[in-house]
């Protein structure tokens, strides 16, 4: 099934580049472009994309508010946030607004295309570099007892679930985890659902934060 994509970015050159990259994948269809958040909301309402590639820093209505409004329209549209800096303060807010994940704008074209398909399948996509920066910031902002209290829920996880959870904490997709652990992707998806339930995590991004706070994943270590 073809994935319908809307590109939203106030940088005309970057927007055109993203459109070209999307056009190289026969499984994707570019259905619209938007130069700001308000335009993105309006266009999304008209063309009902499956995935929106959303810049967060735009004039007027920014990507965070645009994400919130687009998801309020219903229809199953998912938002993938693109950011320039790993520690962009807007990223955490975008996730709270309901974004399905985030990537750095300098990501390789093939990684971007894979991310669009990942999000379209209903998975969250967390760029490892951005994940570490955002979650590390949130950890430092929390009370000192947060790390100790975060270890408790891990006791409920099986050995295999801990292996899967560690890779989730690194920002890996279900497909990447399946390859790393030699498992079927459907099996990984089942493990992730059970992990989220056992941890009481709202979504994958929240689970990543738990992985870092518990010490299972070091936000400063390379992937």
Image (cartoon, grey):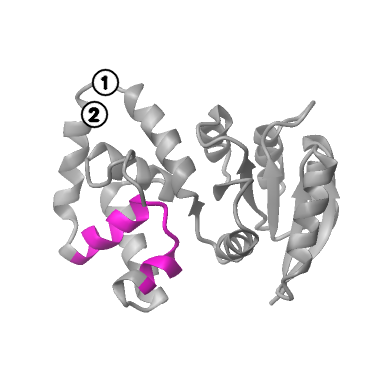
Q: Spatial distance from mark 1 to mark 2, Cα to Cα?
A: 6 Å
Q: Residue at x 85, y 53 (%)?
A: 46
Mark number displayed over residue 135? none
* Quarter of the figure with residue 99: top right
Which secondary structure lies at badge 1?
loop
For the N terminus, give its image quadrant: bottom right
Locate residue 221 relative to residue 91 in the image: left or right: left
* Quarter of the figure with residue 131: top left
- Where is residue 183 shown, x and y percent of the image? 33, 77
Please state the extent of the stretch shown in magenta in the rendering: 160-179
* Quarter of the figure with residue 187: bottom left
Locate residue 70 relative to residue 80 in the image: left or right: right
Locate residue 49 relative to residue 200 in the image: left or right: right
- Asked whether residue 179 appears in the rendered view, the answer is yes
- Where is residue 88 shown, x and y percent of the image? 55, 31
User: Residues at badges 1 and 2 in contact (C-beta under 8 Å)?
Assistant: yes
Which secondary structure lies at badge 2?
helix
Which residue is under mark 1? 143
Depth check, front residue: 105 or 211: 105
Which residue is under mark 2? 146
Q: Is residue 42 above or below residue 180?
A: above
């Amino acid at each position: 099934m073809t994935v319908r994509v809307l590109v939203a970015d106030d940088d005309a050159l970057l927007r055109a580049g993203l459109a070209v990259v999307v056009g190289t994948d026969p499984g994707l269809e570019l259905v619209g472009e938007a130069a700001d958040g308000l335009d993105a909301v309006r266009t999304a309402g008209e063309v009902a994309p499956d995935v929106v590639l959303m810049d967060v820093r735009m004039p007027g209505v920014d990507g965070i508010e645009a994400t919130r409004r687009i998801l309020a329209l219903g229809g199953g549209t998912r938002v993938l946030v693109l950011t320039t800096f790993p520690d962009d303060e807007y990223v955490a807010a975008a996730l709270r607004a309901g974004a399905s994940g985030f990537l750095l704008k300098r990501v390789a074209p093939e990684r971007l295309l894979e991310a669009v398909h990942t999000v379209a399948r209903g998975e969250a996509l967390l760029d490892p570099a951005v994940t570490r920066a955002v979650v590390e910031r949130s950890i430092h902002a929390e009370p000192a007892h947060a790390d100790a209290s975060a270890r408790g829920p891990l006791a409920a996880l099986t050995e295999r679930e801990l292996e899967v959870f560690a890779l989730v904490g690194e920002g890996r997709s279900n497909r990447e985890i399946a390859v790393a652990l030699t498992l079927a992707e459907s099996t990984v998806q089942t493990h992730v659902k059970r992990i989220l339930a056992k941890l009481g995590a709202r979504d994958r991004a929240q689970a990543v934060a738990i992985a870092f706070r518990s010490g299972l994943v070091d936000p400063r270590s390379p992937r």
